[in-house]
Image (tube, rainbow, N blue to C red):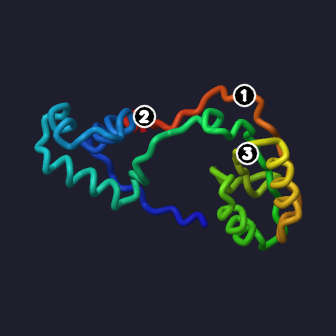
Amino acid sequence: MDERPKAPALDDLDKKLITILQDDARASASEISRKTGYNENTIRYRIDRLKRSGVIKEFTALLNPRMIGLPIAAIMMITTEPNQLKEVFERLAILDETKHILQATGKHDLIVVAHYPSMDAMNNASQKIKSMAGVKEAEIHLATGMIKVDTKFDVNKI
C-alpha cells in the first residue's frame, strides 16, 4: 500500500517545469521553452522523465465538487481490525465517491475524504462502510465548508 519510491533529485529546470505546469497543465513545450530559455526538445524530455519517475502523476482539471452536483463532503476516520488494513483499503479504493484515502498513525488507521450528491447517499455509503468486513470503527464527519484546497507545492522551498 505504501511503497515509497525513492524521490528523484530535482534540479532547477525540473523545479521550473513543475511550477509552470502546476499553474497551467496545458502549457505547451514551446511556451515553456520561451519562459525558461531551454530548448523545446529538452522541455519535452524533462516532462516525460518527470512523468516516468512518478513526480508528475497526471495532468488534470481540478473541479469544485459542489459545482458539479456533489455538495456533501465527508471525512471518515476508520479503525480496522488487526491485520485487515490492506483489505479495507482495497475495498474503499474501489468506491467511486472516495477521493482521498490516507493511512494514518494514532487511533485511526485510515482517513478518507468522499463526496456525495445528497445526505441520503452519504448515509447509505457510511452504513455500507461501517459494516464492511475488517472495519472495527468508522467515525464520519461532515465538512461544513471548504476553507482551503491547495494542490500546488512550492518545490523551491523543499
- In the rendered image, residue 137, in percent from the top left (x then y), is placed at 88, 58
Q: Which residue is mark 3?
A: 116
Which residue: 71% across, 36% down? 71
The mark nearer the N terminus, 2 or 3, is 3
- Kind of residue sitting beneath label 3: Tyr
- Mark 3 vs mark 1, foreground winner is 3
The mark nearer the N terminus, 3 or 1, is 3
Which residue: 19% across, 31% down? 35
Q: Is residue 98 above or below residue 62?
A: below
Quadrant location of the C terminus? Answer: top left
Question: Disc number at residue 57?
Answer: none
- Mark 2 vs mark 3, foreground winner is 3
- In the rendered image, residue 83, in percent from the top left (x then y), is placed at 78, 73
Q: Secondary structure at mark 2?
A: loop
Question: Disc number at residue 154?
Answer: 2
Give whichever of 28, 57 is nearer the camera: 28
Q: Which residue is mark 1?
A: 145
Tag 1: Cα neighbours inside 10 Å, few (<14), some, or many (≥20)?
A: few
